[in-house]
Image: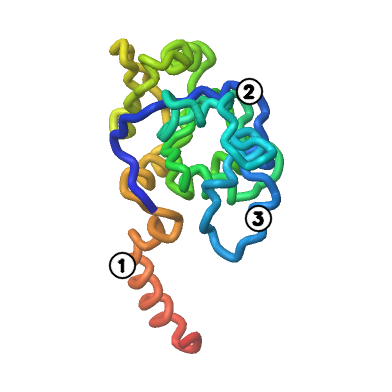
Amino acid sequence: MQAFNVITGVAAPLPAANVDTDVIMPKQFLKGIDRNGLDRGVFFDLRFLADGSPDPAFILNQPEWQNAKFLLVGPNFGCGSSREHAVWGLKQLGIRALIGTTFAGIFFDNCQRNGVLTVQLSPEQWAQVAQEVTLADSNEITVDLPHQKIVLQNDKVIDFTIDELSKLSLLNGLDAVGNTLRYSDDIRQFQQSHLAKNPWLA
């Protein structure tokens, strides 16, 4: 899993509430046998016109917000189905963090397990970020995970909280298996001790 430390990049505003995973990753992109090409599926019905060409009205197709690393999203982002493809596609598209007020629970967990940081702010903090990133000349921000802060171009610093396990996992690029393997010596010692006490299990 790709580690997250201090990242600077463009943030694109997507303030609509209740954006569900079918909007993020439409069902026709769930048919593949691997994860390749999911970046094209992200927001497909919003990003592309009927003829397949990019819709110039969509924020991620506008020059000032192309190649965004962050999305400023509306409340309850990622609701609907539990499809993990939505997170895989966002990551393939280059999105490193989502900044919002609330996220759907399963989607939130999928993000943490796949290396996409979800930053939860108060509505007041969210509005401060929105005020900057909706303008093309101030849409670049820095997300500093070690110090748990967002730095805007006007030098405004916005602090955020994150649970310690998620922070450690993201900083070190560890998925659930990687986190478990941190305790491999303890696991091995337990196995040896357990078998010594219960030799019939061997």
Disc 1 from disc 3: Cα separation: 39 Å
Q: Amino acid at mark 1?
A: Asp
Coloring applied to the structure: rainbow
Given contact means CB atoms under 8 Å apart, are the residues at marks 1 and 3 in contact?
A: no
Q: Residue at x 36, y 78 (%)?
A: 192
Is residue 143 toward the left or the right of residue 135 in the image? Answer: left
Which numbered dot is residue 185? 1
Q: Is residue 120 visible?
A: no
Residue 146, by quadrant, is top left
Query: The residue under label 2 is which amino acid type?
Result: Ala
- Camera-side residue: 63 or 133? 63
Q: Secondary structure at mark 3?
A: helix
Task: State the SS at label 2.
Answer: loop
Mark 3: amino acid:
Leu
- The residue that disc 3 covers is 30
Q: Residue at x 48, y 27 (%)?
A: 99
Dot 2 surroundings within 10 Å: few (below 14), some, or many (20 or more)? few
Q: Which mark is residue 160?
A: none
Dot 2 corresponds to which residue? 16
Q: Residue at x 36, y 14 (%)?
A: 137
In space, the residues marked 2 and 3 are separated at their CA atoms by: 24 Å
| Crowd band around label 1 with a 10 angstrom C-alpha radius: few (<14), some (14–19), many (20+) | few
Q: Secondary structure at mark 1?
A: helix
Relative to residue 153, is residue 42 drawn left or right? right
Give whichever of discs 1 and 3 has the lower sequence position. Answer: 3
